[in-house]
Amino acid sequence: MRIPAGAAIPLAMAGGAAFGLLAPDWARGLAPVSSVFLRLIRSIVAPLLFGVLVSAMAGAGSLRGLGRLGLRTLIYFEAVTTLALLIGWGAVALFRPGDGVVLKAADAPRASAMTFADAVERSFPASLFEAMARGDVLQIVVFCLLFGLAVNAVGGRGEPVRAFCEALTQVSFRYTSIVMYAAPAGVFAAMAAALGEGGLGVLAGLGRFTAVAWAAQLFYAAAVLLPVLLWARVPLRAFARAAREPVLVGAGTTSSAAALPATLASMREFGVPERVLGLVVPLGLSFNAAGSTIHLAMAAFFVAQAAGRSLPSWEQAAILLTLKLTSKGVAGIPRANFVILGALFGSFQLPMEGLAMLLGVDAAIDMVRTGVNVLGHCVAPTAIARWEGASRS
């Protein structure tokens, strides 16, 4: 019987865990297998970020023409995704699911002392190719954002560059899909090596992480999205009926992009004006992926805990800022979050083995994460439409 692709990774995780417990010495020898898989993931980071961020910035020109609506949309997106990032960080800091998980810290040398001013200065690249060679994701992001704004500013003359970046994005995602065929082998090896090294504490930590992830996503829905609806005076029962179908489609397919047609149709029927829907919902796929943002923050700090890394305040702030920038444009694509995490781990010397471990439990979290993404895509145009209406009255 052929095993569906979605079931292969959880089965590989279970098999790797059993092998790690039953034959720990042999299991530790499988570490190079997971390293090869993780190197392939990291190899696509720079092209993917360049394509996604430049095309996103180059295609944002319509915001200037839409004036107040565009500004309010960006303010809303930045506010709710910042709260999502802080909730993910706070959940790991409060419940500490990484305690007891044994991951070896990366061997890359670290600066003995760095001020906040140093961190800011090092965020700006002297050379894009040097930043790509080092895997410095924050420098790559800063360059791509500025370059994308430049492409936007030259208007039609920048169209070939934008088209190239969109094509590069599609090729990069297809490359990632090809690499993901090796995911079961990578997950099996990573789980076997981790349990061979750390025993049952690894499984307990991953179980805690999954439970905390669900709690954080539901907390965001209750503490952020619900108050937004109340503030906008949206009738909750009618909204729940309208949002039910797109949320179920997103959760069932684990793809925000797959839920886009249902989101547009349901919110149009709910009464959101076309001009609001046409701007807010498509932009929300890139700039309003709160569920994915929560998960990115949780994953980064969970792995830091598991590796026994005590991160100084400036480094925690740098990680949050990096995630804030890199999370744009990839949430609607399955497994794209792991490319972003691979770049982040390389930049901040977090153990890449944690990435493969998290991939093993991702199926247990993906449904609620995508559901929260789609719920946010329904709330945003509804609240912004009410905001627009209130300002005109």
Image: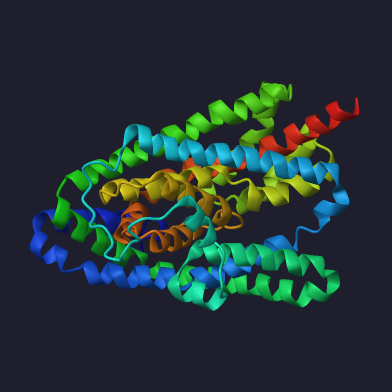
Asked whether the viewer can see residue 88, the reply is: yes
Check the picture and name the quadrant holding the N terminus.
bottom left
Report the side of 275 relative to 184 (left or right). Answer: right
Residue 3 position in % (x across, y down): 35, 61
Report the side of 286 relative to 61 (left or right). Answer: left
Hey, which residue is sitting farthest right in the picture? 393
User: So how many labels did they put on this image?
Assistant: 0
Residue 46 position in % (x across, y down): 52, 71
Going 48% across and 40% down the picture, which residue do you hit? 368
Going 75% across and 69% down the picture, which residue do you hit? 151
Going 66% across and 28% down the picture, which residue do you hit? 228
Question: Which residue is more in the foreground, 50 or 247?
Answer: 50
Question: Which residue is more in the foreground, 299 or 193?
Answer: 299
Check the picture and name the quadrant holding the C terminus.
top right
Residue 254 position in % (x across, y down): 52, 49
Quarter-of-image position of residue 388? top right
Question: Which residue is more in the foreground, 95 or 117?
Answer: 117
Residue 34 position in % (x across, y down): 29, 67
Going 71% across and 51% down the picture, which residue do you hit? 283
Say above or below: 186 vs 116. Answer: below
Say above or below: 222 vs 277. Answer: above
- Please name the colour scheme applied to the rendered image: rainbow
Say above or below: 385 vs 302. Answer: above
Asked whether the viewer can see residue 174, the reply is: no
